[in-house]
Amino acid sequence: MMDTRSQILQKNFEAICINGFQATRTDKVISTLGITKGAFYHYFPDKTSMGYAIVEEILYPMYVNNWLHLKTYKGNPIDGILASLQLISGYCNEENVAFGCPLNNLVQEMSPLDEGFRLKLQKIIATKKTIISEALLKGQEQGQVNPTLQADEIAYFILSALEGSFSIAKVAKSKTVFDKSMKTLMEFLKTLKV
Amino acid sequence: MMDTRSQILQKNFEAICINGFQATRTDKVISTLGITKGAFYHYFPDKTSMGYAIVEEILYPMYVNNWLHLKTYKGNPIDGILASLQLISGYCNEENVAFGCPLNNLVQEMSPLDEGFRLKLQKIIATKKTIISEALLKGQEQGQVNPTLQADEIAYFILSALEGSFSIAKVAKSKTVFDKSMKTLMEFLKTLKV
DNA sequence: TTTGGAACATACCTACAAGTATGTATATAT
DNA sequence: ATATATACATACTTGTAGGTATGTTCCAAA
């Protein structure tokens, strides 16, 4: 059984995935848990703080975990990256494709409005980028990855193409569109092996 | 001198680029024009209709125009695509990078909330995708583009990587990040030439 | 010249979402 | 046994954004 604070975070996170942060009505969300505003404002000073907590306690581990195995990956890091992309692709299906990537959603909506959100979201992206970049560098040292590449450029590009694929698929409401875009990304990555 | 309706659309568009659609307060925006709610509701039945008008009358031509030259482009369509990407890159600078791509912003924010928005935004993406896809197909027929590629997969991928680059650069508040991601996209595209 | 509609302004209404103030039950420490 | 803090519930306040109702001015057609 989850404690009340975690339940508030989890249910609001789910609502934010569908409606966005601003359009999410916290009191309506928690009413589905059988609790009231009293509980909410007992655990969080305001709605924004709850948003921060969601980013740090739910989004951060959720997104970083998808890439963490790269740090100890044996074999060509390109294959490790491909494995992560396959894993992430599995989260996208016909039912949720229209909601897009929760991380990307929050970035688009909140980062220009609230510097606190931006910095916390940026930290997630930066962590993922560092993991990918270091894996590529190690691969270059070990002669597994094309040594003429700039690892950080590739890392940013991978994350861009991934988020962009979610975005294009979201508006098209089509998992097929997501798959087509991701297929090209993956085939491009294979060409980076030596 | 712009007519009142166009001014309302333009100023609200600029506000939406910064704040998003939901957070934009139409009456505050038009007060900077020296007009009041009376004018607004004379031209638009409600805020949503104004949003639709912005998508159709401002965003659609703005985004499609960046790609339209491909239809009559002489030479390798890959070069034509690269020219469009260069053009679009020029719109992004250190001052506005934190606001991201207005089209992508609206997609993320509104497409799951309002089917009218989604369909009108999807029309823009679909039009761009068709132009790129047809240019690639023509290039394949003329022996300028790798014939083993699926043109529509590449087209979706280009748009994904482009939107994703705006997104990653937005949260990083860094034109450099945008450039790094786009550089990789462009170098990838060059490998598609025969 | 009058009449109708276009193009606005002004004042008002109303729903509602965030936040506050206060109360209360329970557990825990002393 | 009493005091105190935790974990909530209930009721209230308040700002405000979207929308409405009602003018008013001006022009153009009949």
Image: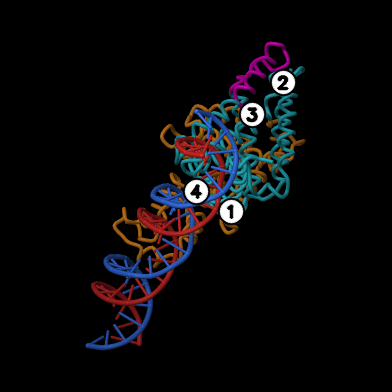
Chain colours: A cyan, B orange, C blue, D red
- Categorize mark 4 by other alpha carbons within 10 Å: few (<14), some (14-19), many (20+): some
Residue under numbered circle 4: B62
Residue B84 x/y as whole percent? 55, 39
Range of magenta residues: A128-152
The mark that comes first in sequence, 3 or 1, is: 1
| Mark 3 or mark 1, whichever is nearer to me | 1
Q: Residues at badges 3 and 1 in contact (C-beta under 8 Å)?
A: no
The count of marks equals 4
Residue under numbered circle 3: A64
**Residue kind at label 1, given as amino acid type:** Ser
The disc numbered 1 marks a residue on which chain? A
Q: Nearer the viewer, residue B181 or B88?
A: B181
The mark that comes first in sequence, 1 or 2, is: 1
Residue under numbered circle 2: A77
Residue under numbered circle 1: A31
Q: Nearer the viewer, residue A74 or B157?
A: A74
